[in-house]
Image (spheres, rainbow, N blue to C red):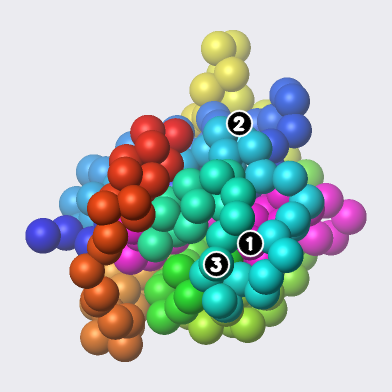
Amino acid sequence: MKPRLHVVIASTRPGRVGPAVAAWFHEFARQHGRFDVRLIDLADFALPIYDEPVHPAAQRYEHAHTRAWSASVAAADAFVFVTPEYNFNPPPSFVNALNFVYHEWNYKACGFVSYGGVSGGLRAVQMAKQLVTTLKMMPMVEGVAVPMVAQALDEQGRFVSNRLIDHSAQQMLEELSRWTGALSSLRPRAPASTETSSTERVALRA
């Protein structure tokens, strides 16, 4: 069975470019062939600013939106976060989503596809890497940066890649595959309850 890779659209604002970039990477990763790839839109979960009364490490979630997000994160073996850059940082929607759960992130590899202006979102990724390591995740050195992303959209708003970007995506997926396999033995595999399984089915339709 292939490990499951969630390609997560990190921006939730109206008019975002993230879905176009993520759709391209989702298909690229699917053709790469090493992962069972799922496209996850953070906007579908409608997470408010963190509102659980108990620390996420306890996993005693009171809200349905938290349980749905928890199930989605837990179902993945690895992640690629598709993110823009806001004031040299990742979007607050992404930071908030990271904070909602804890154990579900542990010992999983992640990569970044960033986009923006001249820097291609690289400064946001550097900040995001510091955040994910506190969740015991392993961020890839390799990554995909898309500078001047508006110029890479066609008349229908679809993202059009190029040879350099494709090469970066290939290299990142190769490393992500290696690290995903290496980290799998560190994660406990407890049987899922009926409630969790039901919630996961809802989350994975997002």
State which quarter of the image contains the C terminus. Answer: top left
**Residue at mark 3:** 60
User: Which stretch appears magenta?
Assistant: 75-100
On residue 152, which mark appears? 2
The first of marks 2 and 3 along the sequence is 3
Label 3 Cα crowd, 10 Å radius (few <14 / some 14-19 / many 20+): few
| Residue beneath the point at 72% across and 65% down | 53
Disc 2 vs disc 3: which is toward the camera? Answer: 3
Q: Amino acid at mark 3?
A: Arg
User: Looking at the image, which is closer to me, 86 or 98?
Assistant: 98
Per the model, the C-alpha gap separating discs 2 and 3 is: 43 Å
Per the model, the C-alpha gap separating discs 1 and 3 is: 11 Å
Q: Is residue 97 magenta?
A: yes
Count of marks placed on residues: 3
Seen in the picture, residue 75 relative to 176 is either above or below; the reply is: above
Q: Amino acid at mark 2?
A: Ala
Per the model, the C-alpha gap separating discs 2 and 1 is: 33 Å
Say which element carries label 1: helix
Instruction: Name the outermost residue toward the top.
Output: 155
